[in-house]
Amino acid sequence: MQDANFKDIPKIHSEIERKSSEIGFTMPSDLYIGSLLKTLISSKKEAHVLELGTGIGLSLSWMIDGLDAKSTLITVDNDPELIEIAEAYFNHDQRVQIVCADGAKWIKNYKGDAFDLIFADAWPGKYSQIDEVLNLVKVGGYYVIDDMAHQPNWPEGHEDNVNRLLEYLEQREDFCLTKMNWSTGIVVAVRKY
């Protein structure tokens, strides 16, 4: 099996990669996490999905491809330039709400329904506000994070943050957890109760 031979890459993906290069965006999600997110979202009918850390929209393109017609997706990022780019690509999709806000404040103020899948690809929801975000996952829903394996761009001491987060997630009895030494280091957790 060739795990890097992807057949279902979103049509817009190469354009977003081009734009990433053009603006010097150095933190795009890879094909592996995108494919996994699309697969997980496809398992949920009428899914309600949250992405924390829109970035330039690479993982968003995969998630949108996994949505059915009645699904909804909220994506949040605090970078106005990146949000403007994501809006240019995805604002036409009525299932998608693109929010430019501080993730921590957005999480604190969110009063809507729980989510079938949360992809936390930013500090809020991953290293801060973790309890609040995990409480927003429906029973049977997924909490997904990446970049858990050492990355060359990690600042000094960040590995301690990762280790603390993994230890905390492993202690949560309400989630079933799988850690994968794949892609950039993936964690998939499912809420049990």
Image (cartoon, rainbow, N blue to C red):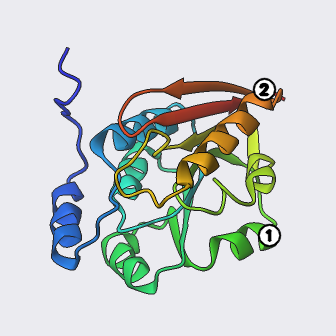
Give the residue pinned by disc 1.
108
Q: Which quarter of the rendered picture does the C terminus lie within?
A: top right
Q: Label 2 crowding class (10 Å Cα cut-off): few <14, some 14-19, many 20+?
A: few
Q: Which quarter of the rendered picture does the N terminus lie within?
A: top left
Looking at the image, residue 178 sits to the left or right of residue 13; the answer is right
Q: Label 1 crowding class (10 Å Cα cut-off): few <14, some 14-19, many 20+?
A: few
The amino acid at mark 1 is Lys
Secondary structure under the numbered disc 2 in the rendered image: loop
Residue 1 visible from this viewpoint: yes
Q: Residue at coordinates 54% horizontally, 47% vertically from top-left?
A: 159
The amino acid at mark 2 is Lys
Give the residue pinned by disc 2.
192
Residue 71 visible from this viewpoint: no
For the residues labelled 1 and 2, the Cα–Cα distance comes to 23 Å
Which of the two discs, 1 and 2, labels the residue nearer the N terminus? 1
Secondary structure under the numbered disc 1 in the rendered image: helix
x%, y% of residue 33? 39, 41
Q: Residue at coordinates 54% horizontally, 44% vertically from top-left?
A: 145
